[in-house]
Amino acid sequence: MSDKNTVTLTFSDGRPPIELPLLDSTLGKQVVDVRPLATQGIYTLDPGFTATASCESRITFIDGEKGLLSHRGYAIEDLAYKSDFMEVCYLLIYGELPTIEQKLAFENSIRHHSMLHDQVSTVFRGFRRDAHPMALMIGVTGALSAFYPDAHNVFDAKTREIAAHRLLAKVPTIAAWAYKYTMGEPFMYPQNRMGYAENFLHMMLATPCEPYEVNPVLARALDRIFILHADHEQNASTSTVRLSGSSGATPFACMAAGMASLWGPLHGGANEAVLRMLEEIGDVKRIPEFIARAKDKSTGFRLMGFGHRIYKNFDPRANVIRETAHEVLDELDMHDDPQFRIALELERIALEDDYFIQKKLYPNVDFYSGIVFRALGIPAAMFTPIFALARTAGWVAQWSEMLSDPAHKIGRPRQRYIGPQLREYVPIEQRGV
């Protein structure tokens, strides 16, 4: 990539111009390197960082205009249909697809890190039983810092690798136990004989009372959902993990910070909002009413699960998960379920109605994942914890990449100050006189 191109910033007040490097990317847009501005006492203003690259990364690429998503150069569609979540985790962390021997060794490591320290169960019991599972996940994941003091040397590559394996292995156990705790059911321990998604479903839905057999079609559907949510470039939660990790904080604290960011309804909580919307609609006959409200700007109402901030075309993950959703509904014979009938009719309208097509309000990954989770018998409160479980793969990869970067610096965004100018302090007895 050539970094020889430049752009010139000129000033109307007669100050000398500033030359800024214009950097090429492997894929995507060129980037203006604004770092030289700081030496001239000038910063850029970009609320929400919508036009700012906060880092250089080799992990994930998104082209929102064309509806493309790839990890390490592999299209998300290929990974979702031809790979499995463990292989995608390996790819995100190590940069290449594994050989058979590498994959077996990686899976074996993850299996043997899936147990939680016995005292972690007492951490769970410090929470109220009616707490949201995400609150438990954030607290327990952060608490793991107290159990693994050896993870604090984050600038050591081997330490980061061990921490990544621990997190990938233990977060599913934490998520499943968070659900069990809120349900008042006994914790189910991980089973080393099971695959990743299969093991999670077992820990979450099985009880000691009777044998529980995981449906392979449903396990594969969940594994595919994990792949689709594994990483998504520099979103709010990933940026939070990077910013937290830039200080050298323990990886468990960084992941807990990412989970806290993901919990927001504008981020990981969107699929919960989809089901709440379906419940509010209640009947297929009421769909025209809600469509009309969505088209009327004065109502402020919008349909949840349609459109995406990044994708101005169809979300490539939605194409995959749409097929997965129908596979699950076929397997469970649930196409006549009232909520699914509402969802399928909304999907049909969004794909045919000129209003949705012109505004590119296509069903997104959140629309379909909520449908799949409900079909699997997973309650809405667990949607975001499962999202966090899958996104842990991307978080640990991004965190490790940042710390291994020779140009690494602690994050320190600037601001445009618009408050009062410097003023004299007035003693309290003289104020208002």
Image (spheres, rainbow, N blue to C red):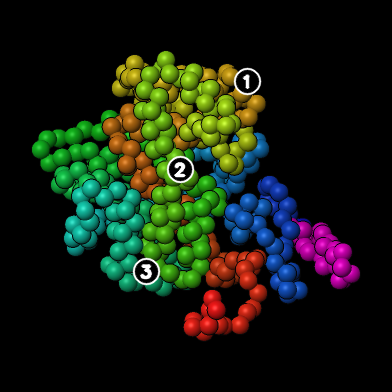
Distance in Å between CA atoms under marks 2 and 1: 29 Å
**The residue positioned farthest toward the right in the image shown:** 14
Task: Give the residue displayed 44% in from the left and 54% down from the top.
Answer: 261
- Nearer to us of marks 1 and 3 is 1
Kindly report which numbered mark, 2 or 1, lies closer to the viewer in this rendering.
Answer: 1
* Residue type of the residue flagged with mark 2: His
Q: Is residue 362 visible?
A: no
Residue projecting furthest to the front: 433
Viewer-nearest residue: 159 or 222: 222
Label 2 sits on a secondary structure element that is loop
Report crowding for label 2: few under 14, some 14 to 19, many 20 or more residues within 10 A (C-alpha): some
Identify residue for label 1: 354
Q: Locate residue 21, reporting x and y percent.
A: 77, 62
Mark number displayed over residue 151:
3
C-alpha span from label 3 to label 2? 26 Å
Q: Is residue 161 left or right of residue 14?
A: left
Q: Residue at x 38, y 28 (%)?
A: 280
Q: Earlier in the sequence, mark 3 or mark 2?
A: 3
**What residue did someone put label 2 on?**
229
